[in-house]
Structure formats: structure tokens, C-alpha cells
Image: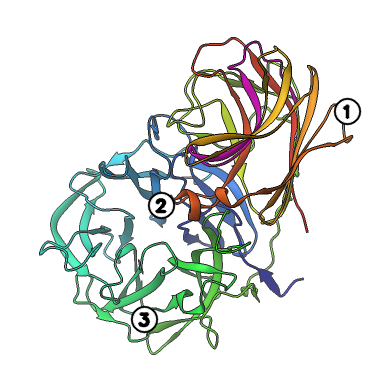
Amino acid sequence: MKTTFRNPILPGFYPDPSICRVGEDYYMVTSTFEYYPGVPLFHSKDLVHWRQLGHVLDRPSQLNLDGTPCSRGIYAPTIRYSNGTFYMITTFVESATGERRNFFVTANDPAGSWSDPYWLKGAPGIDPSLFFDDDGKAYYAGNRVPPAGQQYPKHMEIWLQELDLGSKQLVGPTFSLWDGALKQIHAQEGPHLYKINGYYYLLIAEGGTGHTHSVTIARSETLTGSYEVCKTNPILTHRHLGRDYGIVNVGHADIVETQNGEWWMVCLASRPYGGYYRNMGRETFLVPLVWEDGWPVVNPGKGIIEWETRCPDLPQHRWPSKPACDHFDAPVLDDRWNFIRTPRGDFWSLAERPGHLRLRLKPDSITKPENPSFIGRRQQHPSFAVRLAVEFTPESPNETAGMALLQNSDYQFRLEIGMNDRAETILRLVRRESGIETDLASRVIGAGKRYLKVEAIGQCLRFDYAKVAERWELLIDNVDATLLSSDKAGGFVGAYIGLFAESGGVSSANHADFDFFEYTELV
């Protein structure tokens, strides 16, 4: 049995983790922004090995992402359990300047169906959480602009109000709890409340979700305060380690006590590579903590997240591994696949041609805030290979289908089959950067089943194709992948790799059939 584990525990774009324990079972959720289904739900027995149970928001009635811009949508969920019921609360961000609306959903079985949203009135701010006190009362904690006004840019405070579980609405007075330990650092958010050994502890994120991200804490003998600030704040950050350190922008944490009395923290962080480029976005990491004089000490003696750490004192519980290749033989899509925004229309099928994913061409495009004919999965490693097989014959120059490496609508690569002005079927690599498209390479490949491949060695991409399986021909090598990082593209999400089929803004009856999609790490 292994005595250590490697971070991250959830590689790839799984930010803002929240965790709860029920008996010997651990449940965790993360943010999803404009992707659908929303809020992946994970289950573990040992805090190291996780299996995905599904998604909390998996019905259009729960999650309408129509027109939601990139890096907006579902922010920072929190999962909690009380008296036989699971709760997931989160923020829906409509746009860069639009309304932030907070809601929660419930379930008796986390692997089952969750309720439709209960939208909360009078709940400004983002990153809410729920706290259940010993007397059975429930409370909402979030962030907001301080009632007296902001003293510096992005100055926020954490506030509290009772949640009536009968009416599913906030009731009674609001309370200002704390505006953070790091004055002038900004962006006090992500509050999580706990009651431990007679104290109420308020754990928050400060410094924004970039390089200055951090975790701070305060405590009080009463729920509404006043809150005493921990003198060792921030209790976790990596900003002092510099931009060359392998794990950066550490923050947005949640803590859990095991059934054996140990304490552990989950948090987000990123792994830059090839320079300060974070193509995989913000990922989920695990770090131990202990209590000294009533305050948490994270990873004692070191104070940082390590690549390799001792395992929790729990029986190891591994889950069956997922196959690297999806042959599309199952009756439903694997949980690793996502759509961009809520899927509208009957544009995909696993049944029409068994053993294939059929994507019908849609006028909607991955270059616009629409719901394109696209399914994708997260990039989870700095070096990886993706290969797929597709059958697609374009019927007009505006029809394309193939593979997309996607950061957002304006930063992406498309390895696409299309038609040139001589009506020949071609394969081309399109780079879209800052909304400007450039054809980097193209070949006439003819009709029939074709195989496409991309290999990433760090920030260097190589694209190949084949007319016969595994007889690869080079399309182009040494393509710079850094545009897939939010450091160039902006926003908060990690890179996706997926399949698409488009008809250039007009209706089409055409389709593309994908035989398989394989993702593997290259070491």
C-alpha cells in the first residue's frame, strides 16, 4: 500500500473545491463556469482517490447557460450535509457586468437527482456557503461591498444571514462578519464557516484568484462576531515562492475532519509550464493541517503544498480506472464530457450509428457565445496525446468538423475537415488568437474515414493525420500552445479538447461520425 500521494488530486480544470464528509464517505464539488452539465460531484473513501458520481446540475431546468459569456456562469459551489439532506449552493454570474444570482439545490442521495434551484432574494455577492449550527438553524455566508463603502479597489466583506429551510429564503437581519486579514490585498471571498471546539471559524480567500491568491482565517466565540484575526495569516499561499515555483496561485480552500480525527484541506492551485502559462487552469490539491493553540497550521514545518505528501490515515480505496479511449459504445456520454452552455436541439446521438458519436452540424459556432455542436473534455497534463477517427464529407465550404483545442471563443486551435474553393475535401489547422484566424497548414485528404492526432510536449504541439490507422503523416510541428492559457486569453477556465461540427451560420442536414477519441498522458 502506498504511503504517499501525488498532487493534484483532481488534475485539470477543477477549481474552487468544496468538500464534506458523511460517515466514512467524502464528497467534493468544483466550479464549471459556462460548461454543461454543471458542478461535477466526486466521491472518495480516502481523500486521495476520487470517482465522479455525475453532475449536480444536469438538467436544463437547473442550469440555463444560454448566451453566457466565456468564464461566466457557475462560480464556486459549496457542498454541505445536514440532517439527512445534501446541499449545494453556488453563484450564477450572468455576464462581466450583469447580475450575480445565488441559489442552492438539495438531494437525499448525492448520486441521485438534485432539486431544481431555490433562488435566493436579497443575496448579493459571489461564492456563498451554508453553515448549520448546533441548534439546527441554517445560515448563509457570502461576500458583498461593505455597507460603509469600499476603502480600496475590490474591497469586500463577508456577511451572514439566517436561511429559513422551510421557505428556502433568507430571513432576519444581516451581519457584517469580517473584511479580511490582508488590507489592500482585495477580493475577500469564498467564505466557509465551521464550529470547532467551541469556536466559530471563518475561512476565506483573499488576494484574487491570480498569483497573489491566499487563504486566511478568523474565529469568534459567537457566530455573528466579533472575529479575531489569526496572527499567522495567510495560513496558506505560494505568492512568496515566486513565479518560477511549480505550484502557483494557491487559495480558495475548504477543510474536513476525517473519522480518525485528522484534518485536511482541499484548495485550488495551478501548474504553470513553459513559462508562466497555466493551460490546465486551476486544479484541486490536498494538504494536511493540524491545530495549535486553537489555530490551523497547514502542512506543519513546510507551510506549502508539496508535489508528494503522506497519505491520510485512512484505508486506501482505489476505484476502477477509466479507459483512455472512448469508443462511444455506451448508451450515455461519459461524465468526463461536457457541452459549451446548455445543449439546445437534438444535435448529438450515440444510438443512430452504434459505436459512434454522431454530431449534427449546427449554425452555432465555438467562436461565439452560443451552444455549438461540440463535446469536450479537460486537458489534464502538460504533455499529452489525443487521437480520434472521424467520417465527414463537407457538402459546402462553410461546413467543417474535427478536433478543437479550446481556451475560449477567441483563443483556440481547430484541426478541421472542410472544403476548399475547388470542392476538394481538405484538412487544415486554424489558429484563432484575439479573435483573428490564421490557417497554419492544410492538405487535400479526400473523403472517407480519417484519423487525426495532436501531441503536446509542454507548450509545443504537433498535428498529424492518417488515411489508414496509425500510418501518420505530419501536418505541422512546433506550434506554440501558450494561447490555450488564461494568461494570454484571460478568464478563469482551463483548456478543453473536443469534437465539433459546424455549418457556418446556416442550416445543414449534414453530420460527422466519430468512431473513437483517445486521451493519454505523455511522459
Which numbered disc, 2 or 1, marks the residue that appears first in the sequence?
Answer: 2
Question: Looking at the image, which is closer to me, 66 or 200?
Answer: 66
Whether residue 401 is situated above or below residue 84 in the rendered picture: above
Considering only vertical position in the picture, is 2 above or below 470?
below
Give the number of the mark in front: 3 or 2: 3
Circle 3 or circle 1, nearest the eye: 1
* Type of amino acid at the residue the image marks with label 3: Asn
Say which residue label 3 marks.
233
Say whether disc 3 or disc 1 marks the residue closer to the N-terminus. 3
Q: Quadrant of residue 313?
A: bottom right
Of residues 262 and 424, which is closer to you in this image?
A: 424
Q: Which residue is mark 1?
A: 468
Question: At which x and y percent is residue 206?
Answer: 35, 68
How many residues crowd mark 1 within 10 Å: few (<14), some (14–19), many (20+)? few
Q: Quick check: 40 above or below 288? A: above
CA separation in Å, label 2 and label 1: 46 Å
Crowd around label 2: few <14 · some 14–19 · many ≥20 (10 Å): many
Observer able to see residue 29: no
Q: Amino acid at mark 2?
A: Pro
Q: Which quarter of the figure is the N terminus placed in?
A: bottom right
Q: What's the CA distance linking mark 3 and mark 1?
A: 59 Å
Identified by mark 1, the residue type is Val
Residue identifier under label 2: 77
Q: Is residue 409 magenta?
A: yes
Asked whether the beta carbons under mark 2 and mark 1 sit within 8 Å of each other, the answer is no
Q: What's drawn in magenta, residue-wise?
A: 390-415
Looking at the image, tell me whether mark 3 or mark 2 is earlier in sequence order.
2
Q: Name the mark nearer the viewer: 2 or 1.
A: 1
Q: How far across and down, in percent of the image, does residue 151 sit?
A: 16, 68
Residue at mark 3 to residue at mark 2: CA–CA distance? 24 Å
Residue 434 in sight here: yes
How many marks can you see? Answer: 3
